Amino acid sequence: MPVFFDTNVLIYSISRDPAETTKRDRAIALLGRQDGALSIQVLQEFYTQATRPTRPHRLPHDMAADLVGAWTRFRIQEMTLAILNSALEITARHRFSYWDSAIIAAARALGCGQLYTEDMSHGRIVEGVEIVNPFR
């Protein structure tokens, strides 16, 4: 069963902040897995955050684009009308933000058993997907 990586896993993997060394190492280890999955949304969010002008040690376009390309080795969920509708249902049912709901919907669509993220409730199971904070 694949596992889904949220944007913060990708962002921590490029961190140069000494205070985030443990998180960076954990993120790199996770991204070494063969059973990973992502969504177009996660890749878009990564690129936007990694290259934003106010980011310390921001990545140049070419480097960020190369990382996005490298991560396409994982299973990728595209944004579809079905994902949008599923995200809207998750938002209504579980009170997550739309963006978090879209991540959960993508993970569920790919058959992922776990969603690795720092941004949601660790241990909660939503629509059959267990939320795991790998940085705890």
Image (tube, grey):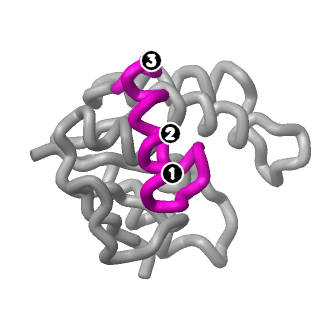
Q: Position of residue 41 (x, y in %)?
A: 53, 31
> Residue 14: in sight, yes or no?
no
> Residue 130: in sight, yes or no?
yes
Q: Earlier in the sequence, mark 3 or mark 1?
A: 3
**Residue count near mark 1 (Cα–Cα under 10 Å), binned few <14, some 14–19, many ≥20:** few
Judge whether 47 appears above or below 4 on screen.
Answer: above
Q: Position of residue 78 (x, y in %)?
A: 40, 20
- Report the Cα–Cα distance between label 2 and label 1: 6 Å
Q: Mark 2–mark 1 contact, CB under 8 Å? A: yes
In the image shown, does 110 or 58 lie closer to the viewer?
A: 110
- Three-letter amino acid code at disc 2? Leu
Residue corresponding to mark 2: 88
Q: Is residue 23 magenta?
A: no
Q: Is residue 96 magenta?
A: yes
Main secondary structure along the magenta-highlighted residues: helix
Residue corresponding to mark 3: 81
The residue located at (31%, 76%) in the rendering is 123
**Residue count near mark 2 (Cα–Cα under 10 Å), binned few <14, some 14–19, many ≥20:** some
Give the magenta part as a residue range.
Answer: 77-101
**In this rendering, position of residue 83 left or right of residue 109:** right
